[in-house]
Image: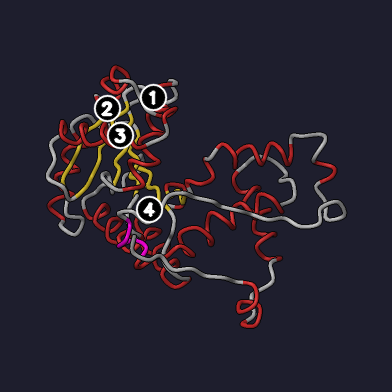
């Protein structure tokens, strides 16, 4: 099966820190479909070779276990291509369409690893260029907006040009081995599963400890902030995994239904509780 993965935000932090290492691991272990092609999209004026060199240099900053050897990267790099685009210009999408038409892949995935305020623009431009075909899928990386209104606006706009089964809303945190293992601990462990009850557990603390600072993500944090970046998605997903009842099956809808029960059971914060129980910090220079 031929497969094209188009990474909008192909030079961004999420791409090189999370997506490329994961794609390399899939390539290394043979789980990436045969005939795959990975097309990075960004504003930078890069050739394919310069883009490959950029990604190779970024691999020096990921965990040692996830770094490819020179020979491994040389083989992986053959999958990488780059397209320079201004995401607001229709003619650039026409060029992307022509590039994708060169081989007519069986499946095309548009992965939007960009700021959420660009989701609607990209979706509309893809549709205008005829790139919302039935064999196309679109992936929206969290956060989906900055509040309820913007979230609904994104879902409405994307839903106008893609059907629901073509849309994948993703939180990459759920792919972490420790998070995956949590489900096995909850529902596949005969020792813990019967004890995972309020009668046996006094309290649960969720700690997301990171050594990573803001680094070059100042623009992102200036508009999004740590609360939207970490708590309303990553932390709440962990809370759901810890508190949910066993789903009736492993289908995505069944898991979602049980997670929703947890979220609907949460008590809303009062102003008094926020003042007493919440501590916020602010990044400073240095």
- Looking at the rendered image, the quarter that the N terminus falls into is top left
What is the crowding at mark 1: few (fewer than 14 residues within 10 Å), some, or many (at least 20)?
some
Q: CA distance from mark 1 to mark 2?
A: 10 Å
Give the extent of the magenta segment: 217-221
Q: CA distance from mark 4 to mark 2?
A: 27 Å
Q: CA distance from mark 4 to mark 1?
A: 28 Å
Q: Say which residue label 2 marks.
A: 79
Q: Are marks 4 and 2 in contact (CB under 8 Å)?
A: no
Say whether disc 4 or disc 2 marks the residue closer to the N-terminus.
Answer: 2
Q: CA distance from mark 3 to mark 4?
A: 18 Å
Say whether disc 4 or disc 1 marks the residue closer to the N-terminus.
Answer: 1
* Disc sitting over residue 49 in the figure: none
Q: Say which residue label 4 marks.
A: 162
Say whether disc 1 or disc 3 marks the residue closer to the N-terminus.
Answer: 3
* Residue at disc 2, secondary structure: loop
Say whether disc 3 or disc 4 marks the residue closer to the N-terminus.
Answer: 3
* Residue at disc 1, secondary structure: helix
| Looking at the image, residue 221 lies above or below residue 73 | below
Task: For marks 4 and 2, give the one nearer the viewer.
Answer: 2
Q: Are marks 1 and 2 in contact (CB under 8 Å)?
A: yes
* Disc sitting over residue 4 in the figure: 3
34 or 162: nearer the viewer: 34
Q: Tell me where residue 259 appears, x and y as whole percent.
A: 65, 54
Q: Are marks 1 and 3 in contact (CB under 8 Å)?
A: no
Q: Say which residue label 1 marks.
A: 27
Q: CA distance from mark 2 to mark 3?
A: 10 Å
């Amino acid at each position: 099966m031929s497969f094209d993965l188009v990474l909008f935000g192909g030079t961004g932090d999420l791409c090189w820190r999370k997506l490329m290492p994961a794609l390399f691991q899939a390539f290394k272990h043979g789980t990436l479909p045969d005939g795959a092609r990975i097309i990075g999209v960004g504003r930078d004026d890069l050739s394919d070779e310069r883009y490959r060199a950029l990604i190779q240099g970024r691999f020096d900053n990921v965990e040692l276990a996830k770094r490819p050897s020179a020979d491994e990267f040389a083989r992986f790099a053959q999958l990488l291509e780059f397209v320079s685009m201004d995401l607001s210009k229709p003619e650039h999408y026409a060029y992307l369409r022509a590039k994708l038409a060169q081989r007519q892949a069986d499946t095309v995935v548009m992965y939007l690893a960009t700021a959420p305020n660009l989701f609607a623009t990209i979706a509309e431009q893809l549709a205008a260029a005829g790139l919302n075909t039935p064999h196309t899928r679109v992936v929206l990386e969290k956060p989906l907006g900055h509040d309820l209104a913007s979230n609904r606006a994104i879902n409405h706009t994307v839903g106008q040009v893609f059907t629901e089964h073509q849309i994948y809303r993703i939180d990459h945190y759920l792919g972490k081995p420790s998070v995956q293992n949590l489900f096995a601990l909850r529902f596949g462990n005969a020792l813990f599963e019967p004890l995972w009850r309020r009668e046996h557990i006094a309290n649960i603390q969720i700690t997301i400890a990171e050594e990573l600072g803001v680094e070059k993500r100042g623009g992102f944090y200036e508009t999004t902030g740590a609360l939207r970046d970490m708590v309303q998605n990553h932390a709440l997903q962990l809370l759901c995994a810890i508190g949910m009842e066993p789903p009736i099956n492993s289908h995505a809808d069944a898991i979602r239904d049980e997670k929703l029960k947890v979220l609907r059971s949460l008590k809303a914060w009062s102003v008094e509780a926020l003042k007493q129980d919440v501590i916020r910090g602010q990044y400073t220079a240095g």
